[in-house]
Amino acid sequence: MEIKWQKSSFSTDSEGNCLELAPQGDEVLVRESDNPNMIVTTTKAKLAAFLAGAKAGEFDHLI
């Protein structure tokens, strides 16, 4: 089965700083486009909680 990676439209190809995500069953795969062999697996619920925190600005101090 082919993995269909998706990246944000806010990612820039020129600098290679893209996070890519792909659904796989009940989980979500996450990788960096410049290091595609390192893949992190998480659940949809954990990703949803992280995205909610990101939208609320909880991680803004890291950038």
Image (spheres, grey):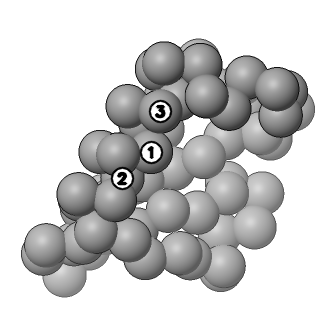
The amino acid type found where label 2 is placed reads Leu
Q: Is residue 29 above or below residue 18?
A: below
Q: Secondary structure at mark 2?
A: helix
> Measured from the top left, where is residue 47 in percent x and y?
36, 52
- Discs 2, 1 touching: Cβ within 8 Å: yes
> Measured from the top left, where is residue 13 in percent x and y?
72, 31
In what quadrant of the picture does the N terminus appear? Answer: bottom left
- The residue where tag 3 is placed is 53
Q: Secondary structure at mark 3?
A: helix
> Measured from the top left, where is residue 15 in percent x and y?
87, 32
Q: CA distance from mark 2 to mark 1?
A: 5 Å
| Residue in front for this viewpoint, 58 or 47 | 58
Q: Is residue 6 left or right of residue 61?
A: left
In what quadrant of the picture does the C terminus appear? Answer: top right
| Residue in front for this viewpoint, 54 or 37 | 54
Which disc, if any, is residue 50?
A: 1
The amino acid type found where label 3 is placed reads Gly
Q: Quadrant of residue 25?
A: bottom left
> Measured from the top left, where is residue 31 in percent x and y?
58, 63
What is the crowding at mark 1: few (fewer than 14 residues within 10 Å), some, or many (at least 20)?
A: some
Q: CA distance from mark 3 to mark 2?
A: 10 Å
- Discs 3, 1 touching: Cβ within 8 Å: yes
